Image (spheres, helix red, strand yellow):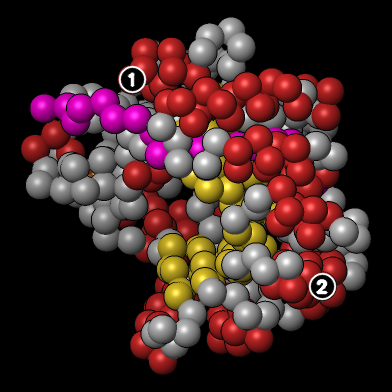
């Protein structure tokens, strides 16, 4: 039986796809939108009001780089006036003097700052910008000085997985209350760069032990969240907490989506805010209802005791690996093609090992057309590998 339709609690607002960095694991779609496709201030404020009316309690202001929006202070103030909790997700480079203080004055509740590496050379290589590490350190200091609680985001892949102990020390030294050690999710640009980014199983196991020990050691001092890697998992994660269950996201042009990679599912079409109200989209959009609850499930999910724990995993990963968005997420041990996940990971590692210079196989994120490999790593269609 399907779960009852509840109001959404969280919303991710991708205010822009513009960004000064070019991380090869960016969760934005490969087809990035230019500035002239972004919604204006009044439309975002209207959307935020409708979100608050619908029940949204938390808005994550993201991008691209959300601080590139000159109206960010106004957007924060609009949300704050409705009593909505605001979290700014930023790369922390190129933020003009006085703006972080202005965000705090407008009512910002929290800052989530990403570091591409714990070492300056890693941050600069992964984000493809010289000097970016020092700018991030400065942003962290300014956020703390403005009285804002801070989370450090550490997206993990083969080029920084050995830096996990240093990430922990870095987050502590910056006064963060939370550190998110998040193994990269392979959709969007990360899927295009999977071979270049994939860590090996031994590194993943070492990382899990380090995180577990640090959690015990730092209990009551700093929280450490750990987003585990799907390619070596036994069970999948409940992606987005379940499709259209309690959260959604909005792209810069107002397209309302159940998750950041939903547009990779070709059978679905998505509505834009303005063409229809937010409540109308949440309640009755065919795309939102496509995988809501459990009625859509096939076996083995349909009769599985975990079906309301992980909601069948990630629809976009099922699409990417199994070629069927309604299939069991291949990260699940019960999926008939589960073995293909680790086979893909291993094949990627072998391919990337041929590239001696770190990062030389990256397709760096950029606006404008299909991605071009700077120095392409050999790739293969997923389905060519035996499961
Ligand atoms: Fe989750 Fe489906 Fe796997 Fe059961 S079979 S654990 S519901 S993904
Ligand atoms: Fe779309 Fe997981 S990213 S359901």
Q: Against 72, is 215 above or below? A: below
Q: Is residue 150 left or right of residue 335?
A: right
Image coordinates for residue 21, horizontal then vertical, percent = 80, 54
Q: Is residue 87 visible?
A: yes
Spatial CA distance of label 2 from label 1 is 44 Å
Q: What range is drawn magenta here?
A: 1-19
Image coordinates for residue 99, horizontal then vertical, percent = 83, 55
Mark drawn on residue 138: 2
Q: Against 372, is 95 above or below? A: below
Q: Against 80, is 237 above or below? A: below
Q: Which residue is mark 1?
A: 289
Mark drawn on residue 269: none
Towards the viewer: 88 or 182: 88
Q: Is residue 105 magenta?
A: no
Image coordinates for residue 367, horizontal then vertical, percent = 81, 36
In the image, farthest residue toward the bottom: 217
Decide: few, some or many residues near mark 2? Use Cα within 10 Å; few <14, some 14-19, many ≥20.
some
Residue at 60% across / 84% down in the picture? 172
Q: Is residue 11 magenta?
A: yes
Q: What secondary structure prevails in the magenta region?
A: loop
If the image is split into quadrants, where does the N terminus sit? Answer: top left
Q: Quadrant of ligand 1?
A: top left
**Badge 2 or badge 1: first in the primary sequence:** 2
Residue at 8% across / 38% down in the picture? 303
Residue at 50% across / 63% down in the picture? 183
């Amino acid at each position: 039986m399907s779960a009852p339709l509840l109001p959404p609690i969280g919303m991710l607002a991708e205010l822009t796809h513009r960004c000064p960095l070019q991380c090869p694991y960016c969760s934005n779609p490969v087809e990035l939108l230019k500035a002239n496709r972004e919604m204006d201030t009044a439309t975002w404020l209207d959307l935020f009001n409708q979100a608050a009316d619908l029940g949204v309690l938390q808005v994550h202001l993201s991008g691209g780089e959300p601080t590139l929006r000159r109206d960010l202070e106004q957007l924060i103030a609009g949300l704050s006036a409705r009593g909505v909790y605001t979290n700014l997700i930023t790369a922390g480079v190129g933020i003009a003097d006085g703006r972080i203080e202005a965000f705090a004055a407008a009512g910002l509740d929290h800052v989530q700052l990403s570091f591409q590496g714990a070492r300056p050379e890693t941050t600069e290589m992964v984000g493809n910008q010289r000097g970016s590490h020092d700018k991030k350190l400065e942003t962290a200091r300014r956020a703390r000085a403005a009285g804002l609680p801070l989370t450090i985001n550490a997206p993990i892949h083969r080029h920084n997985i050995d830096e996990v102990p240093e990430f922990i020390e870095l987050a502590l030294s910056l006064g963060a209350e939370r550190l998110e050690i998040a193994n990269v999710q392979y959709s969007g640009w990360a899927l295009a760069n999977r071979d270049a980014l994939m860590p090996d199983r031994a590194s993943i196991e070492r990382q899990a032990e380090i995180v577990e020990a640090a959690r015990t050691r730092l209990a009551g001092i700093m929280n450490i969240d750990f987003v585990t890697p799907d390619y070596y998992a036994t069970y999948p994660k409940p992606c987005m907490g379940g499709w259209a269950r309690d959260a959604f996201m909005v792209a810069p042009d107002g397209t309302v989506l159940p998750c950041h990679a939903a547009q990779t599912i070709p059978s679905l079409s998505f509505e834009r805010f303005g063409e229809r109200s937010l409540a109308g989209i949440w309640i009755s959009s065919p795309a939102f209802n496509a995988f809501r609850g459990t009625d859509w499930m096939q076996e083995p999910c349909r009769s599985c005791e975990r079906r309301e724990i992980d909601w069948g995993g990630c629809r976009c990963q099922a699409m990417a690996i199994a070629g069927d968005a309604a299939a069991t997420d291949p990260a699940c041990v019960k999926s008939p093609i589960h073995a293909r996940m680790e086979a893909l990971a291993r094949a990627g590692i072998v391919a990337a090992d041929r590239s001696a210079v770190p990062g030389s196989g990256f397709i760096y994120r950029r606006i404008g057309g299909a991605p071009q490999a700077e120095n392409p790593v050999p790739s293969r269609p997923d389905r060519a590998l035996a499961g």
